Amino acid sequence: MPLKHIAALALVSALVAPAGVAHAQREAASPAAVRTPELDRRLFVGACYQPIDRSPAQIAADIAVMKRAGFNMVRMGDLSWDSFEPAEGQYRLEWFDRVLDQMHAAGIKVILDVPGLPAPGWLHQRYPGVDIISQDGARRHAATRYWDDLSDPDYRRRVTALAEAMLTRWGKHPAVVAVGYDNEVGSSPMSYSPGVKQRFTAWLKQRYGTIEALNAAWATQRWSRRIADWDSIDLPYGEGPGPNERNLDLHRFWSEQTIAALSEIDAVRARVAPQLPAISNLWPEAGDKGFDYLRSWERYATFGALGFYPGDPLGAAFQVMMMRAGSPRPVWFNEFTAGGGGDYGTPGRSRMWAYFGLLTYAQTFLAWTFNSHLGGEEQSLFGLLDHDDRPSWKVDEFARVATEFRKVQTLGFPRQDTPPVAIGYSFQTNWLLTPPPGPNTMKQYFVGNYQEQAKAAFQPLFEDNIDAAVIDVAHDPIDRYKLVVLPSAYVMDAPTADAVRRYVERGGTVVMTGYSAKADVTGQWFGTPLPGRLSDVFGLRTNAFYRAAAPLRVAFAGQELTGTDPYYEVLEPGSARVLARFSGVPGDPAAITVNRFGKGRAIYLATAPQATLLGPLLRSLYAELGIARGPVTPPGVVARAVGGRTLYVNTRDEPTTVSLPRAGRDLLTGETVSGTHTLPGYAVALVE
């Protein structure tokens, strides 16, 4: 490797503080440290509510419906910037005073959202730098929501001024218990304005220091693409084509801009209303842009929060645990499924997902939305009230949830314990493994979907009803976990490698799969033995890889396992011991190895993450690591033992029978149950 390349890598690595030190420094001053005694042991059921759509008479009637239904929380303020500030610096706030006062009188708590997204028309007209410019140079006026450039200084100045006005007026209102920032942050598209180019160039200067270091990090000697000076830098094409290294830095730039925008609003909260927790409806995995939530969550979030619109249970659980990250606190569903676009709703489904949320550490369930929208982009999205303001059956279903949750919140909910297992997830790896269109051999090498592969590692634990955190192992301390799984950990930067090395040295167990530790912090492949930075920890070298013509077969722990992905790597064990081999491929190479390193062990699975192979491997570790399997359930039923009781949730719309270890009573129905118990479709049971 050229000396200047080594120097560039050293410079970039130095920009990231060691995980333990950095975490300790951040924790002392972050919103994650806000104390929340009023919230900690309660469950909240309610709705998202936009009073801008409603007349004073409708608002009074709506609040009466909420009170009868037992709602104790609403989220308000979002999507309403020009209702609070119809022109620059001209605030109209009195109308919202009356709504807050009515909510307080009804005993309903409020998340106050600072509505930074979408930005109002006057902001775009006065400050055209807020406009989105396509990568082809075309201006896109704000024809749809979120077409706003969060990196623009004028946008940032005006949104923090809005936050100042709102929190100064309502930060101590007795109804307000939390504050949220913008809406679905991460979903704005990238912009290619001259201002963005200047900011990106300044970001590169700060990151790399010299043009030589940038050239080394971007491998510009390839294809005669050397950059002569800082003025010669072009914005990489987010929609392609372009080399991986540049695209990775483009995503990092936008990520840091998004995090900075959130942090600036949080600085207003810390100064004006420091007692309020920050609970924002975020969208870090959004396809347009996203941001690195897992390496930054505590800078702007007290509780992880999201819009919860689940599809399959595995994906839903994975998403919730990602938003919880390494926090000890529960998760808030600031938007919660009550139907969907063009979907009126299915009886029992929202109640089922609410109990599913309880199992995955959720605390708050706010229906999207209270009243059905008559116009705009969501006019066929059906709320709890019909379009003619008649309460639908969904009000009764959410009222039932509210009634039941007042009881179960005394029985160990919301959950706040630490899962025994962590799944490592990296936004940077996801960006690098999702290259832009164009000539790029990455697409031929990595055949698959990184998010789906991470879920494949999560799947055996989910099926065994074992909690698993989803974290970036370089950010959150991992010593608290009994087992760490690294699926397709393609980018292995110094902080990640250091965290894994320390964890294993101190006695931890790590399982890492193929596709891991191939690229350094720049996105280029290591010029050292693979797995990069960890070859000694895993006691092996891996370089050659192939794809089998037939499904991979592995004999392990007395079982004959069949894979679902044909990719495999040829391992060259050094100090590592072979636990299993592939059969039916040339040479019967090692499929699973284990290496003792320090007081712990590092296990390598030489193929892509896949549940059929990872499941038996992980289960073979449970007893030794003290990981207890959860309740045994049939497919489709999720369960956890909490406080001496077992909560069963049937996620299917058809009856399913579960076997009970002993006789008991369903606390939700009062029914005595024993032997087996049949759960109707979408039904739940809390058995004591």
Image: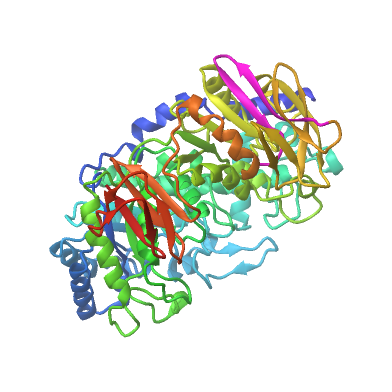
Left or right: residue 291 versus residue 93 is right
Which residues are drawn in magenta? 588-609
Q: Nearer the viewer, residue 272 or 581?
A: 581
| Extreme residue in the top direction | 598
Query: Is residue 88 in view?
Result: no
Left or right: residue 123 versus residue 75 is right
Q: Give how far across and how far down residue 551 sits, in percent.
A: 76, 46
**Up-down: is 395 above or below 327?**
below
Q: Residue at x 53, y 48 (%)?
A: 291
Q: Nearer the viewer, residue 75 or 451?
A: 451
| Extreme residue in the left direction | 105
Left or right: residue 130 versus residue 612 is left
Q: Give how far across and how far down residue 685 sits, in percent.
A: 32, 55
| Extreme residue in the front direction | 675
Assign the magenta stretch its main secondary structure: strand
- State which quadrant residue 158 falls in: bottom left
| Magenta stretch: includes residue 596 | yes
Q: Give how far across and how far down residue 353 sits, in percent.
A: 39, 59
Query: Is residue 229 in view?
Result: yes
Number of marks in picture: 0
**Up-down: is 83 above or below 294?**
below
**Up-down: is 21 above or below 88?**
above
Q: Nearer the viewer, residue 676 or 330?
A: 676
Quadrant for the N terminus, please. top right
Q: Give how far across and how far down residue 130 sits, in percent.
A: 52, 61
Q: Residue at x 38, y 65 (%)?
A: 350
